[in-house]
Image (cartoon, grey):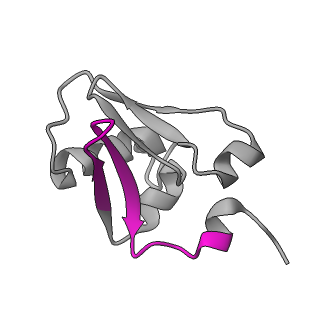
Amino acid sequence: MTAPGGAQRASVADRLLARLRTEAPFPVPEGAACRRAYVGRWQRAAGAWSWFLVGAGQVGSPYSMKQCLAGERLAFTHNNFGDSWEVYPDPEPHLVERVGVTS
């Protein structure tokens, strides 16, 4: 994607990775990458991750990469049982928006 002025704009995944490196309470090593998870509507409604971080343990989010970037900052929840991290935009959008239900 090209930004105004002809400069190459970083992808959504690269911009999210840059924010994770500055905001995450865990280390994000060089070589880590954000990857989209291709889950169905019902899996998303149940909280399945929309993306995950490759090369940095179990890190992901039920929110899309774009929704995470839209937040003022990133919020993190640690699950000790599975030793995983969930990433959320902060402030968090309304649940109906996350699931994609329309009225």
Residue 95 at what x, y percent from top left?
A: 60, 71
Q: Is residue 27 magenta?
A: no
Q: Decide if residue 40 is on the left or right side of residue 89.
A: right
Residue 28 at what x, y percent from top left?
A: 19, 35
Quarter assignment of residue 43: top right
Q: Decide if residue 62 is on the left or right side of residue 60.
A: right
Residue sitting farthest toward the front: 81
Residue 55 can be seen in this image: yes
Residue at 40% of width from left, 60% of height from top? 88
> Which contiguous range is marked in magenta?
75-96
Residue 39 at what x, y percent from top left?
A: 67, 36
Q: From the viewer's perspective, is residue 65 above or below residue 82?
A: below
Quarter assignment of residue 83: top left
Residue at 58% of width from left, 51% of height from top? 47
Q: Pick the residue in front: 60 or 80.
A: 80
Residue 46 at what x, y percent from top left?
A: 64, 51
Q: Decide if residue 18 is on the left or right side of residue 6.
A: left
Residue 11 can be seen in this image: no
Task: Tell me how many marks there are.
Answer: 0
Residue at 58% of width from left, 33% of height from top? 37
Q: Pick the residue in front: 52 or 72.
A: 52
Which image quarter is the C terminus in? Answer: bottom right
Q: Is residue 78 magenta?
A: yes
Q: Pick the residue in front: 6 or 1.
A: 1
Q: From the viewer's perspective, is residue 93 above or below residue 56?
A: below
Quarter assignment of residue 98: bottom right
